[in-house]
Image (cartoon, rainbow, N blue to C red):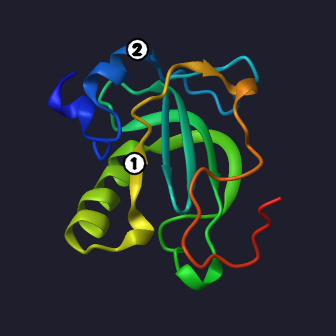
Amino acid sequence: MSEQNKNPLVLVPESTAKLMKSISGRDKGSVDELLYCHLYGVVGDWYLSEISEDREKAFGFQMINSEPVWEMDNWFTNSSKWGEISIKELQKLVNEKFLKEKDIRFLITRDLSWEPIKFSEINTDQNTLFYPGSTDRSFS
């Protein structure tokens, strides 16, 4: 495994990008969509199925669930939808806000054990990670 593949803070290494289809410009996915990469952090999850040639944008499903007290509105809007995802911007937030400034809100990591699966096989009812001290969450 290359050094990039071992580092979960490299959100989409070249080896993962090579597995993905080229971005097709559509705005909706399907239950049969094959997801090649899973990114997650305290604000949510991103499931990627397609990527642009320059590796700066991806298409996939995102579930963002940011608590109002986190003051994340400048970066993320709460949503649960298919669409374009800026890999360039996510990586920039990881590099500048998490690694440089040590702001835990911007911890976004790649699931190193992820194997491609269909969208229908993932649980979209709750985020992968929960921020310590979260409010108004049901863990049932």
Give the percent coordinates (x, y) of residue 21.
47, 15
**Is 49 drawn above or below residue 68 in the view shown?**
above
Mark linked to residue 19: 2
Name the residue tied to disc 1: 109
Q: Residue 45's x, y, as percent?
A: 57, 48
Farthest bottom residue? 69
For this view, does 80 lie left or right of residue 14? right
The local secondary structure at tag 1 comes to strand
Mark 1: give few (<14), some (14-19) or many (20+) Cα within 10 Å: many
Residue in front for this viewpoint, 54 or 118: 118
Q: For marks 2 and 1, give the one nearer the viewer.
A: 1
Q: Is residue 93 above or below residue 17?
A: below
* Left or right of residue 103, residue 34 in this image: right
Amino acid type, residue under disc 1 in the picture: Thr
Where does the C terminus fall, quadrant-wise? bottom right
The N terminus, quarter of image = top left
Question: Where is residue 118 shown, x and y percent of the image?
Answer: 67, 20
Q: From the viewer's perspective, is 53 left or right of 48?
A: left
Find residue 105 and report its image quarter. bottom left
78 versus 123 height, above or below: below
Check disc 2 and give the amino acid type: Leu
* Quadrant of the image occupied by residue 117: top right
Mark 2–mark 1 Cα distance, whole angstroms, equals 19 Å
**Which residue is painted at 33% across and 46% down in the image?**
88
Q: Which quadrant of the structure image shows residue 67?
A: bottom right
Task: Name the spot of residue 25 as percent of width and height, x first.
Answer: 56, 27
